[in-house]
Amino acid sequence: MRYYSQVAAPSTAHLNLWKQRLGAVPESVWDRADLETLILADNDLSEISEKIGRLRHLRMLDLGHNRLAALPESLGEIEGLSDFLYLHDNRLSALPAGLKRLTRLRYLNISENRFEQFPECVCAMENLVELRASDNQLALLPASIARLANLRELHLRNNRLTTLPDEIGDLKALRQLDLRGNPLQSLPSPIANLPRLEKLDLRWVATLSFPPWLAQLESRGCLVYR
């Protein structure tokens, strides 16, 4: 999912290099300290320079659909990054600890990567509204996920989750929880008390005995797909 229409107006503050077969980011990009939007998706990029930390005015950054196995620590210096950070469809297995400084970020997509452990730095991004971490190899979520008090959508499709921490029940703003295609053995009952939950997706989960409290969710209007 992309939101380019929101930044489509011509402006020197927006640089769209989507699908240009770059192979490497032109050095001139790192001199664009005025940039608010930078789109580098689908360019066969295997690395990003530490110089990206110079772009302190970025609000939206798209690095999706590349070949990145690591990100520079300096990415965490762009503390004004507030709108969108797309990192999906790369080869990432970890994120730099410095990304915990991105506390204004509202949307993060780390789907279609190689994460086996949930990046702890994400739990410090306290203003996240939507988090997409589908199509990875995650077996556990940390209890610190509870710090994402503003989260409305959590997408975890096609991972290796067998359960979730009880602290998932602390995400009082959560509206959508996508758990499709996980080998779930159980679900924590605090999910039943999420006051704003509108959609719980459990399709393609053949390992779970559905708990009786799902009926409680459905009775108050939550759509439960199973």
Image (cartoon, helix red, strand yellow):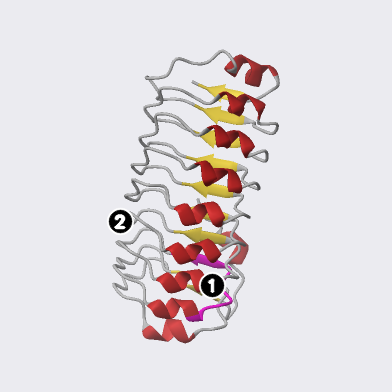
Does 57 sit left or right of 226 as displayed?
Answer: right
Place of residue 76 in the rendered image (x, y in percent of width and height, measured from the top left): 49, 69
The mark lying in front, picked from 1 and 2, is 1
Disc 2 secondary structure class: loop
Disc 1 to disc 2, C-alpha distance = 22 Å
Where on the picture, by quarter, is residue 127? bottom right
Q: Residues within 10 Å of mark 1 (few under 14, many from 20)?
A: some
Query: Is residue 51 covered in magenta?
Result: no
Place of residue 138 in the rendered image (x, y in percent of width and height, measured from the top left): 37, 41
Inspect the image, locate mark 2, and give the three-letter code of the amino acid beneath it: Arg
Does 158 sit left or right of 55 as displayed?
Answer: left
Q: Residues within 10 Å of mark 2 (few under 14, many from 20)?
A: some
Residue pictured at 31% horizontal, 70% vertical: 47
Say the numbered circle drawn on residue 31: none
> Magenta segment range?
54-62
Disc 1 secondary structure class: loop
Return the residue at label 2.
91
Query: Is residue 57 covered in magenta?
Result: yes
Residue pictured at 56% horizontal, 77% vertical: 56
Place of residue 3 in the rendered image (x, y in percent of width and height, measured from the top left): 56, 57
Does 5 sit left or right of 204 as displayed?
Answer: right
Return the residue at label 1.
78
Q: Are marks 1 and 2 in contact (CB under 8 Å)?
A: no
- Asked if residue 71 is positioned above or below residue 2 in the image, the reply reads below
Inspect the image, locate mark 1, and give the three-letter code of the amino acid beneath it: Ile
- Asked if residue 217 is positioned above or below residue 92 in the image, the reply reads above
Place of residue 19 in the rendered image (x, y in percent of width and height, measured from the top left): 37, 66
Residue pictured at 63% horizontal, 38% vertical: 170
